[in-house]
């Protein structure tokens, strides 16, 4: 519906008149589990009650047809408004104001305090809270962690010793030094070695941030902080709205952005400071073809091998590729469509993933965080074969060899040498897999 900060503004403005209830009607099988929903509520900082409509009873009774859908009910519980898709905050605000005025005149609004259960807390989180992405750099021996639930970045050694904390830990959009800067659920990162600069997808701020790692200074280089509501041709980076940038890949002077909210890949030209669509026509779906005509669906992970980009097209549960230069076609390696998902090793359209969020590349293989299957898989761009490498469908936190290991919705991957670093999101942990032995261990962070 809305970004959470906007929704909280409405709740604060109409705290005596508006009751917000979220209804979660799952698409993927793993989303039916109440514990999965609880983790998502905590991860996104949701403050209102959420119903797990696991069997789609509410969906059917209210004849819902799309995600997201918004229903406005009057004080008697009757539907007086309905909207499919996202809606501008200003529009919803004006509708609420008119409805409140109307029902105030009839005396139907009850402003007595609403009693709700205790709000969820992240008590189980320690040094990390729902880390979304990780970036390992063998050349400098550094590990960059998007500590998403704490709204900050950690810079550590590959062995886990934290060297820098970037961000105050308070949610917001503020540039400045490492203790003053603010992020809002940051995710993917890209490192420019020569400049010692880190680019960050500040997802819920709908912005791209630049971190001078020598000084720890953070500045906004793309986005306005407002979410884009429609497809457009781009423009100057600092005056162009973005929508949920989820991951980044650096190719020459271009930062390629997995723009999940617009179902596209975008490019930030670091020389001209211009933004423009790189791949995807805008509609949500799976359609291969020329870059400008292809359809994508919430791309949320991206990596480059120098000649090609590989990306996790999350809502179609697919892994896709496109040339990193100005030409080329979008091609699907694994996956088949918006409602074809599962957990099946195989070739091309016969293989099944379930909402993958992260990818990494090494020696001719794409490593995939098969998020809702709680696994790490490999995909060969040459043969299109998908195979399970680590983990099982059973969620958990357990070290071990190969499929003996347990993860809980891993969201990000990165390779340094023979080590695969895994952002194990719902376990609030970074895991490390030795790619020669397939031994998985949990990284101990020190100094934070």
Image (cartoon, grey):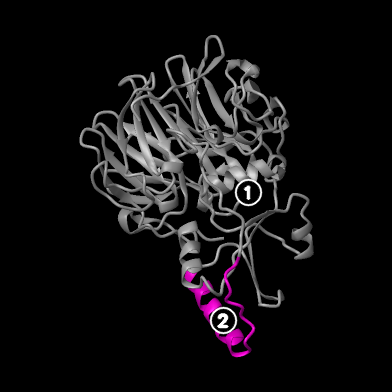
Determine the residue located farthest toward the top in the rendered image.
437
Judged by its main secondary structure, the magenta piece is helix
Determine the residue located farthest toward the left in the rendered image.
215
The one nearer the camera, 370 or 281, is 370
> Is residue 156 something one can see in this rendering?
yes
Disc 2 marks which residue? 100
The one nearer the camera, 416 or 31, is 31
Question: Horizontal and vertical percent for residue 224?
Answer: 35, 58
Compared to residue 328, the image places residue 447 above or below, namely above
Magenta-highlighted residues: 89-114
- The reply to whether discs 2 and 1 touch (Cβ–Cβ < 8 Å) is no
Residue at the spot 79% in from the left edge and 57% down from the top edge: 57
Residue at the spot 58% in from the left edge and 22% down from the top edge: 382
Secondary structure type for disc 1: loop
Compared to residue 19, the image places residue 369 above or below, namely above
10 Å crowding of disc 1: few (<14), some (14-19), many (20+): many
> Is residue 269 something one can see in this rendering?
no
The one nearer the camera, 373 or 49, is 49
Residue 285, disc: 1
Residue 101 image-quadrant placement? bottom right
Secondary structure type for disc 2: helix
Residue at the spot 54% in from the left edge and 66% down from the top edge: 87
Looking at the rendered structure, the number of numbered marks drawn on it comes to 2
- For marks 2 and 1, the one nearer the N-term is 2
10 Å crowding of disc 2: few (<14), some (14-19), many (20+): some
Question: Horizontal and vertical percent for residue 60?
Answer: 78, 60
The one nearer the camera, 375 or 122, is 122
Residue at the spot 57% in from the left edge and 60% down from the top edge: 1
Q: How far apart are marks 2 and 1 (CA)?
A: 39 Å
Question: Horizontal and vertical percent for residue 128?
Answer: 44, 34
Question: Horizontal and vertical percent for residue 62?
Answer: 75, 65
Residue 187 image-quadrant placement? top left
């Amino acid at each position: 519906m809305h970004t959470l900060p906007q929704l909280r503004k409405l709740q604060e403005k109409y705290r005596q008149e508006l009751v917000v209830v979220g209804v979660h009607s799952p698409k993927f099988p793993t989303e039916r589990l109440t514990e999965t929903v609880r983790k998502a509520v905590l991860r996104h900082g949701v403050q209102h009650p959420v119903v797990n409509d696991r069997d789609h009873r509410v969906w059917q009774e209210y004849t819902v047809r799309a995600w997201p859908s918004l229903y406005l009910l009057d004080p008697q519980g009757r539907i007086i408004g309905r909207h499919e898709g996202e809606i501008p905050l200003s529009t919803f605000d004006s509708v609420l104001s008119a409805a409140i005025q109307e029902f105030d005149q009839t005396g139907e609004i009850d402003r007595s305090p609403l009693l709700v259960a205790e709000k969820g807390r992240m008590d189980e989180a320690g040094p990390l809270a729902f880390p979304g992405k990780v970036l390992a750099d063998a050349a400098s021996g550094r590990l960059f962690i998007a500590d998403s639930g704490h709204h900050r970045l950690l810079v550590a050694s590959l062995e886990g010793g934290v060297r820098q904390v970037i961000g105050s830990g308070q949610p917001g959009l503020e540039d400045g030094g490492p203790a003053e800067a603010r992020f809002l659920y940051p995710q993917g990162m890209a490192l420019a070695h020569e400049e010692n600069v880190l680019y960050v997808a500040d997802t819920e701020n709908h912005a791209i941030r630049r971190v001078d790692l020598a000084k720890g200074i953070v500045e906004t280089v793309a986005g306005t902080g407002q979410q884009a509501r429609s497809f457009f041709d781009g423009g100057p980076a600092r005056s162009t709205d973005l929508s949920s940038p989820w991951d980044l890949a650096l190719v020459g002077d271009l930062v390629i952005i997995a723009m999940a909210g617009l179902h596209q890949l975008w490019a930030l030209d670091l020389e001209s400071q211009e933004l423009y669509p790189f791949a995807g026509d805008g509609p949500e779906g799976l359609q291969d073809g020329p870059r400008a005509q292809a359809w994508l669906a919430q791309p949320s992970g991206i990596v480059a091998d120098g000649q090609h980009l590989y990306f996790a097209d999350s809502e179609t549960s697919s892994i896709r590729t496109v040339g990193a230069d100005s030409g080329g076609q979008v091609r699907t390696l694994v996956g088949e469509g918006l409602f074809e998902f599962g957990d099946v090793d195989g070739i091309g359209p016969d293989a099944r993933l379930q909402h993958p969020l992260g990818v990494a590349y090494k020696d001719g293989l794409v490593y995939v965080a098969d998020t809702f299957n709680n696994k790490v898989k490999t995909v060969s761009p040459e043969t299109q074969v998908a195979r399970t490498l680590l983990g099982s469908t059973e969620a958990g936190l357990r070290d071990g060899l190969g499929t003996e290991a347990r993860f809980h919705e891993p969201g990000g991957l990165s390779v340094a040498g023979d080590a695969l670093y895994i952002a194990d999101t719902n376990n609030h942990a970074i895991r490390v897999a030795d790619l020669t032995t397939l031994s998985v261990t949990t990284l101990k962070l020190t100094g934070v």
